[in-house]
Amino acid sequence: MNNKRKHDRFEMAEDVMFANTLIHPFCYYGGSIINCSKSGVCLSSRYEVACGDQLCLRMIGNQLQSCTSIDDLTCVAEVKWCQPVNLTREPKYRIGLHYSGHVPVRFKP
């Protein structure tokens, strides 16, 4: 099997909120980052998104206490894929995102 990834992935366990910037820019959903690379991030969520959606991601939890600006915890990324994961009764998805624009240090490996 060929690995199409341009950059290595690194595990990252961070809770995030995300919103679709075009459809519902102020309606945030929950998720958790699984891993990240220089070019993107993979997260899991109960909420399905569509390829091409632009999501605003914001780290939450302990990160909020140590940041000086909300911009340090926020980035925009495009959905490249969204796959269902059937491990539980509730719907769950893995979402592959490619960063768009400025990427704060906290989102980098």
Image: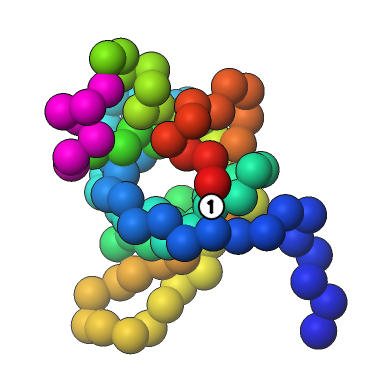
Of 43 and 36, which appears nearest the observer?
A: 36
Point out the residue furthest to the right here: 2
Total numbered labels: 1
State the extent of the magenta-drawn residues as a range.
Answer: 61-67
- Residue drawn at (42%, 77%) of the image: 85
Task: Inspect the image, locate mark 1, and give the three-letter code of the amino acid beneath it.
Answer: Cys
- Left or right: where does residue 53 sit relative to residue 27? right
Q: Is residue 97 visible?
A: no
Compared to residue 107, the image places residue 66 above or below, namely: above
- Residue drawn at (49%, 27%) of the image: 104
x and y percent of residue 52 in the render? 62, 43
Compared to residue 92, the image places residue 1 above or below, namely: below
Rendered-image quadrant of the N terminus: bottom right
- Left or right: where does residue 3 sit relative to residue 73? right
- Left or right: where does residue 10 sit relative to residue 31? right
- Residue drawn at (30%, 18%) of the image: 70
Residue that mark 1 sits on: 36
- Residue drawn at (47%, 62%) of the image: 11
- Left or right: where does residue 104 sit relative to residue 73? right
Of 70 and 108, which appears nearest the observer?
A: 108
Quarter residue 10 falls in: bottom right
Q: Is residue 57 magenta?
A: no
x and y percent of residue 97 in the render? 57, 48
x and y percent of residue 78 in the render? 59, 39
Q: Secondary structure at mark 1?
A: strand
Q: Is residue 65 magenta?
A: yes
x and y percent of residue 71 in the render? 38, 17
